[in-house]
Image: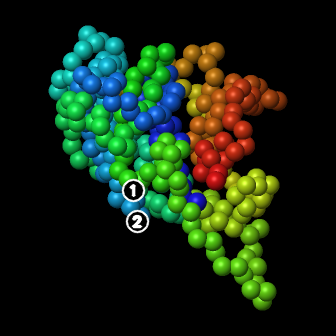
Amino acid sequence: MASDLSNIIKEELSNTLEQLLSKKTSIEETSKVDPKEYESSQAIEVNVKFEFKTLSSQWAFYIPTISAGKFEYLMLGGMGELKEHIDDEVADAVNEIVANICGSITTSVNAQGYEDLGTVKFESLGSEIVGAEKFKDKENIFKFGVNMEDEKLPVLIAFDEGILPFIYEISGVEPQVEAAAPSASASSTPSPMGKVSAPVNEHVSSLLSLLGEDSITNLKLLFDIKLKLSVRLGTKIFLLKDILRWDIGEIIELEQMVNEPLEILVNGIKIGEGEAVIVEGKFGLKIKSIGNEQTRLSQIGLGN
C-alpha cells in the first residue's frame, strides 16, 4: 500500500506555526473547501514544487486575509497593529512561514525513508496576492482548520492529482496497492528476518509488504528495531543577535508553562503528551495522553 503523508503534513503545519508564532496550535479538521466560504476573500498564493524519487508534485498554499494578517502580527511578536488587508509585509511573512512548513515536511518525509517515495526536496516557485476566483473552484483544494488558542485560522492547500494517493487520509483517494510478491518455492532459503540490523528507514516498507496488513501481532518482526524517544520541554523563537549574546549562566525563558504537558516524540514525530516525574533520582515521564497502537504505528511510519 502506498505511503500516506497526511499525518506528516498536519503535524508539521501545526508544529511549524506553533514554533514560529509562539502560540499553541493544532489542526482540528481537514475538509474540501466550500467555494461559498471564500467568495469575497483575498489570499496569498505560494506555489511550491516537491520532487520525490518517482514523482514531481506541485502544491499551492492559499493563506486567506484573516490568517495572513494574524500570522504577520504574531511573527512580529504582537507588536504594531493587526492588519485587515494584505500588503507586501504580510506577504513576506507568509512566504517565510510556508517555506518553513515545507522544509519541515521535507525533513520529516526524508526521516521516514518511504520506499515508494524515496527522498524529497522542495523548491519555492513564487507567490502573489490573489482573489477568491483564483482558488475557490480548484478541484483538489483542502482547508486545514488551524486552531490557535481557540482562534480559527484557515490554511488552504491545493494539491495536484499525482500526490492524492499519497495523502489519502486527507484526499479520500484510494491509495495505490503494490502487486503482491511471488510466493517462494519449497527449495527457497528463508530470509533471516530476525537478524535485521539496518536502520528502520531502509527496511520498514519492505518488511511490511511481507506481513499481514490487518494483524498487529505480525509486527513482532519489527519490535526489536530501535526508535529514538525524546521529550520536548518547550520552544521559543529568538533573534540571532540574542543567541550570539548568550553566555554561561544565562537563563532562557520558554513559552511552555510549568503546568502544561510535555510533548512525547518518537523519531521526531509527536505521538502523545506527558508530565515529568522523578524515578529513583532520574527524570522520567508519565504519559497523560497517547493514541492507540494503530495510531502510533501510523504516526511513526509503521502503520498500514
Mark 2 — residue?
A: 54
**Residue 43, quarter of the rendered image:** top left
Q: Pointer 2 and pointer 1: residues touching (CB < 8 Å)?
A: no
Q: Which residue bears the numbered disc 1?
A: 162
Q: Dot 1: within a 10 Å radius of its alpha carbon, few (fewer than 14), some, or many (20 or more) residues?
A: few
Q: Which residue type carries mark 1?
A: Gly
3D distance between C-alphas at marks 2 and 1: 11 Å
Please provide percent x and percent y for residue 268.
56, 43
**Which residue occupies the foreground of this view, 160 or 260?**
160
Q: Secondary structure at mark 2?
A: loop
Question: Does 36 sit left or right of 218 as displayed?
Answer: left
Seen at 38% across and 61% down, the residue is 55
Q: Position of residue 195 (x, y in %)?
A: 74, 69
Task: Give the percent coordinates (x, y) of residue 198.
Answer: 63, 65
> Would residue 76 appear left or right of 142 to someone viewing this image?
left
Where is residue 207? Give x, y as percent: 66, 65
